[in-house]
Image: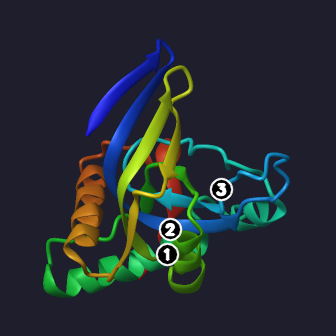
């Protein structure tokens, strides 16, 4: 992974691999006069960082409706709770925390083949491994722009995949150690199981 400082206000991370839960997927409006625009953008959660979440990249009607009942939305939160419950069946040390913590970020998807895979095979609440993304972080706001480009690879992950389990176990550890203040840093309340 290369780190490049563009200027004093931005940091650019190149060729980064991330594992995330998809919390929303939205086509990019086709109103760019140059004709060059992303295919769409994802809202994703990776269990790190503190809220508030990054604002929606493009405040389309679909994106506003998708986040109206929470960010991440109840569908994604329920899926995380379901996976945690499955993990608890084999590992009794896993407890289901009362809340999902961490922020939700945007991933710009430029390639039509990647966007087609996402729209057809990646439902909200599922996990993805995204390889070789670029991340631009604006220092004064900590706003992140994650970019999936022509050299990025998207891999849908099974619910109990090692990376998914590791992400949820690490999130669980941080919540139980009270690294997050639930009233301030919660992203979504988990349903009682």
Q: Quadrant of the N terminus?
A: top left
Question: Of label 2 and label 1, which has the lower sequence position?
Answer: 2
Residue 168 quadrant: bottom left
| 19 sits to left or right of 123 | left
Colour scheme employed for the rendering of this structure: rainbow
Question: Whole-percent x and y of residue 116?
Answer: 58, 77
Q: Which residue is mark 2?
A: 22
Under circle 2, the secondary element is strand
Residue 118 vs residue 75, the one in the foreground: 118
Residue 17 vs residue 53, the one in the foreground: 17
Q: Which residue is mark 1?
A: 125
Under circle 1, the secondary element is loop
Q: Classify 4 as above or below 190.
A: above
Circles 3 and 2 in contact, beta carbons < 8 Å = no
Q: Classify 142 as above or below 35.
A: above
Question: Of label 1 and label 3, which has the lower sequence position?
Answer: 3
| 35 sits to left or right of 9 | right
Cα distance in 3D space between marks 3 and 2: 17 Å
Q: Residue at x 52, y 52 (%)?
A: 104
Cα distance in 3D space between marks 1 and 3: 22 Å
- Mark 1 neighbour density, 10 Å: few (under 14) some (14–19) many (20 or more): many
Circles 1 and 3 in contact, beta carbons < 8 Å = no
Of tags 3 and 2, which is closer to the observer? 3
Question: Whole-percent x and y of residue 50?
Answer: 45, 41
Q: Residue at x 40, y 59 (%)?
A: 152
Question: Whole-percent x and y of residue 171?
Answer: 30, 57
Q: Which residue is mark 3?
A: 38
Q: Classify 121 as above or below 50.
A: below
- Mark 3 neighbour density, 10 Å: few (under 14) some (14–19) many (20 or more): many
Circles 2 and 1 in contact, beta carbons < 8 Å = yes
């Amino acid at each position: 992974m290369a780190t490049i400082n563009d200027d004093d206000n931005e940091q650019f991370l190149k060729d980064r691999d991330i594992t995330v839960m998809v919390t929303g997927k939205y086509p990019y409006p086709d109103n760019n006069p140059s004709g060059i625009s992303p295919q769409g953008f994802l809202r994703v959660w990776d269990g790190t960082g503190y809220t508030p979440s990054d604002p929606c990249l493009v405040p389309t009607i679909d994106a506003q409706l998708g986040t109206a009942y929470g960010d991440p939305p109840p569908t994604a939160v329920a899926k995380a709770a379901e996976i945690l419950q499955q993990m608890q069946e084999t590992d009794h040390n896993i407890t289901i925390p009362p809340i999902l913590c961490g922020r939700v970020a945007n991933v710009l998807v430029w390639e039509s083949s990647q966007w087609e895979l996402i729209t057809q095979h990646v439902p909200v609440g599922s996990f993805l491994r995204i390889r070789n993304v670029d991340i631009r972080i604006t220092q004064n706001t900590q706003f992140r722009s994650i970019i999936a480009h022509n050299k990025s690879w998207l891999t849908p992950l099974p619910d109990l995949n090692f990376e998914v389990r590791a992400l949820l176990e690490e999130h669980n550890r941080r919540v139980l150690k009270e690294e997050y203040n639930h009233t301030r840093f919660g992203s979504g309340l988990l349903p009682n199981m």
